[in-house]
Image (cartoon, helix red, strand yellow):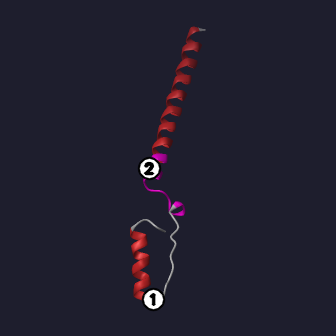
């Protein structure tokens, strides 16, 4: 009977350890996503055109937004 109890306890402790490691990995992943959030969570620009823009100026402005993490 003691041997069954020890075996059951060992299995239980193993599951607790695995669950703890899994929780820590999940927490690490969440923190990494805060540092570099997915594109769907980027800010939305208020972008207005106050005149006629040439294609190269539009591309320059879009590139500037992308460089700053605005998708």
Residue at the image position 42 percent from the left and 78 percent from the top: 61
Please say if the residues under marks 1 and 2 sit with CB atoms less than 8 Å apart. no
Q: Give the number of the disc on residue 32.
A: 2
Quadrant of res 57: bottom left
Quadrant of res 60: bottom left
For the view shown, which residue lies furthest in the top direction?
Answer: 2
Looking at the image, residue 56 lies above or below residue 25: below
Name the chief secondary structure element in magenta: helix
Which residue is disc 1 drawn over?
53
**Disc 1 and disc 2: Cα gap in Å?**
38 Å
Between 39 and 25, the one lying in front of the other is 39
| Disc nearer the start of the sequence (1/2) | 2
Residue at the image position 47 percent from the left and 51 percent from the top: 34
Residue at the image position 50 percent from the left and 59 percent from the top: 38
Q: What is the x, y in percent for residue 64?
A: 39, 73
For the view shown, which residue lies furthest in the front direction?
Answer: 50
Looking at the image, residue 54 lies above or below residue 28: below
As for residue 40 lying within the magenta part, the answer is: yes
Q: What range is drawn magenta here?
A: 30-41
């Amino acid at each position: 009977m003691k041997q069954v109890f020890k075996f059951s306890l060992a299995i239980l402790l193993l599951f607790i350890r695995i669950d703890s490691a899994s929780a820590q990995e999940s927490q690490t992943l969440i923190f990494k996503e805060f540092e570099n959030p997915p594109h769907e969570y980027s800010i939305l620009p208020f972008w207005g055109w106050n005149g006629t823009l040439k294609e190269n100026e539009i591309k320059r402005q879009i590139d500037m937004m992308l460089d700053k993490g605005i998708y």
